[in-house]
Image (cartoon, rainbow, N blue to C red):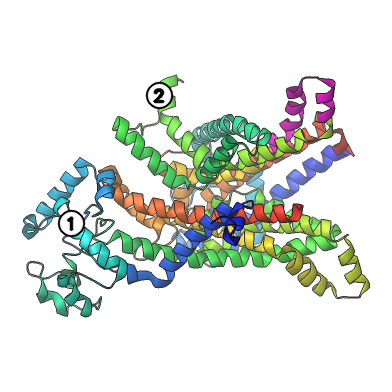
Amino acid sequence: MRTIAKIVGFFAGSLLLVSLLIFSIIHLTPGDIAEIHNLSPSTAHQLHLDRPLAVQYFLWLKGCMVLDFGISMVNGAKVSSQIAQYAPPTLLLTFGSLFLSLLVSIPLGVYRGLRPVSPLGKVISLAVYTLSSIPVFVLGYIVLAIVFGVFHFYVTTPPDGPFRFWPYLSYYSLPIFVLAVGNGTIGEFVRFISLEVQNVNSAMFIKAARARGSRLWKHFFRSMLLPIFNIVVTNMAVLLGGLVVVERIFNFHGLGWLSWEATLKRDFSVIMGITLTMAFLIRVFMLANDLLAVWLDPRMRE
Amino acid sequence: MKGTAFYRFLKQPGGYRIVSGWLIVGLLALATSTGSVWTDYGPEELDLDHLLSPPSVGWLKRLLATEEGLRMQARNQAGGRGDSGTRPLNSDDEDLDFLQGDSGEGAQAAPDIGAGAEEAAKGHGDSGAVGGAAGTGGYGQDAKHTNKPHLLGTDKNGRDMLALLIAGARTCFLPGLVTCAFALGLGVPLGLFAGYYGGRVRKIVGTFNSTILSLPRLVLILVVICALEPNVYYTMGVLGGTLIPRVSELIATRVRILSNTGFILAAKEAALSDFKILYRHLFWYQNRAVFFIQFSLIMAESILVETTLSYLQFGTKPPEVSWGNIIEGSQMSFFSGFYWITFFPAVAIILAILGFFYLGDGLNARLAYREGR
C-alpha cells in the first residue's frame, strides 16, 4: 500500500512541477501579454492578467483541476472545448501509430535479438537505423510523392458521421504510417526489444526452462511484457511531439495542428492547455507503468 | 588491403558505421568551410531566366522532372518574360553543355571559354557586367551567368539549388553546437554529481529529469517560441535543455558503478579533492568517450529539430537558408510536379542526420566492445 501511495504522490507532484514550469516559461519571460494581444482592460481582467503572478498561477491551477483552461486570447473561445474538439482524431492517430509500430517492431526485434549476427539480423538493424533517422516531414513528403505518383490524389477531408471503415482508413492511414515509421519510434523499439530478448535469452531461468523442456514462449512473454510497456511509455513523449509535424504536413486537424496554430498566433492560454493535457497523458502512462511493475514484480513491493 | 591497419579498424565492431559517418560529416564540414567554391552561383543570386529549371544532370532530370512539371515550367517562362520564349530552357540540348561545365566545376582549372572571362570579373554584387550578355538587361547581377548550367536545378525564385544546399549546411552546424553546449555542459556535471554523491543530490536531479521527460520535446520548444520571439539559438538552447536527462542519466549510471572501484577509493585515500576526482578520474579518464559519442548523437538530433522547426516556420527565417525552410517554401511547387526542389534538401537532411547518427552509434559499439574485452 505504501508503495502505491508513494507512486501516486509522485504522479501528482510531478504534474504540479510541470504546470509550474509551463506557467513560468509563459509568464516570466519578457513581454507583456496584454500588450502583445492588444487586450482591453476588461478582457485582461477576465483573464486575471491584472493580478499578481502567484494569484494568477493558483487561479489557473484551480481552473485546470476542473478541466477549465481559461479562454483563448485570440478569439475568446473556451480552450477546454477546443481541446475536446480536436483531441479524438489525435488520440486515434497516436494509438494507431503506436499499434502499427509495435506490430512491425516486435517480430523484427525478437528475430534480431535471437539471431544478432545473422545476415538478416544485420539487414534489419541497418534498415531500422536508416529509417529511424528520416525526419517526419521528409518521410511525409516521400510518402506523398509516392501516393501522388500512383493514385494522383489523396484524401484531405476528414470523414464525419458514423464510423465506416474505408473513409476512415483512407484518411488516417498515411498520417499513421508516417508517424509510426518516421519518428524514430520503430528504430527505438526494435533496438530495445532485441537487447531485452538477448538479455532474457541468456538468463538462468530460460536455461532452466530449456533444460526442463518446457514451452519457452510462455517465459519469454511474461518477462517481455513489462519492458515492452516500459519502452512504449518512454516513447509517448516523442510520439506526441511528432504529432505537431505530421498534422502540419497532412493538414490534419488535431491537437498538434492546434498547438502549431496557437504558437503562430501566440495564443498563450491554448498552448498552456495543450501542453498540460499532453503532460497529463504522458504522466498517466508512466503511472500505469509503475503500478504494473508493482503488480507484476513482487520485488518492487518493498 | 587485407592486413592493413585500416582494414583491421574497419573489421572491428562499428567500423563501417564509423567510417561512413566520418565521410558524411567530413563532406558537411567541407561544404560548411569552403562554401561557394563549388558553385557558379551564390545562394542569394536570382537567375530570373531559369525559374524552376530542372537539374541539368541527365539522370537526375529523368528521375525527378515530371512531364507536367516541364510543361508548366515552359508555360511559366513564356508567360512571365516575353523575351525568354526563344531562349533554350535548361533542358535536353544543354546536357552536353553540362558535361563541359562539370569538368570545369570539379577542378576549377579549365572553365569553358565563355565563362572564363566572366570568372575574372566575378564580384557577386556588381551590376557593371550587365552589358555582356544581350537580352537580359535589367536583371543586373544574373546576366553574366546565363550559360552556366544549374547542376541541381533552380527553385521558384531562380536560386541555384546546389548553392542553397551548401548555404543550408552552414545554418545547421552552428545551432547544433549551441545544443551540444547546453546539453553536455549541464548534463555532464549533473550526472557526475548525481552518480558520485547519490542520496539527496540524486533525488533532486532525478526530479528535474522526470519533469522534463514528461513533456514532449517539440511541444516544450513551441511553448518557449510562443513566449519569446522565434529565434534559432533560443530554441536550440531549449533543445539542449530537453536532452539533459539523457546525458545525465547515462553518466550517472556509469559513475555510480565506478565510484566503488579501487582506483576511486585510492584517490579518496590520497586526499584528492572531490573536484579532481570528479573531473579528472571519473569524467576525463572514464567517460570522455561517452561525451564524444553523445556529442555526435546530439548533433544529429539538433539537425533534425532545426530543420523541423524551420519547416514549421519557427526556425530560420526565409532570407536565410535552411534545408527545412527550402522544403517549406517548395510546398506549392511540390504539388505541381517540381519534385527536385523538395528532393535535394530532403536527401541532404537524411544524409546529415545519418552521418552523425552512424558516427555516434559506431563509436558506441566500439566502446562497448573495448570495455567488454
Q: Secondary structure at mark 1?
A: helix
Q: Which mark is residue B179?
A: none
The residue where tag 2 is placed is A167
Judge the density around disc 1: few (<14), some (14-19), many (≥20) Cα neighbours within 10 Å.
Answer: few
The residue where tag 1 is placed is B96
- The answer to whether residue A23 is seen in the rendering is no
Vertical placement of residue B39 versus B353, above or below: below
Range drawn in magenta: A207-230
Q: Residue at x 10, y 52 (%)?
A: B79
Find residue B253 and report its image quarter. Answer: bottom right
Is A216 colored magenta in this rendering? yes
Find residue A252 and report its image quarter. Answer: top left
Q: Residue at x 29, y 71 (%)?
A: B108
Main SS, magenta region, reads helix
Q: Is residue B36 left or right of residue B53?
A: right
Q: Secondary structure at mark 2?
A: helix
Residue type beneath disc 1: Leu
Q: Is residue A278 left or right of residue A3?
A: left
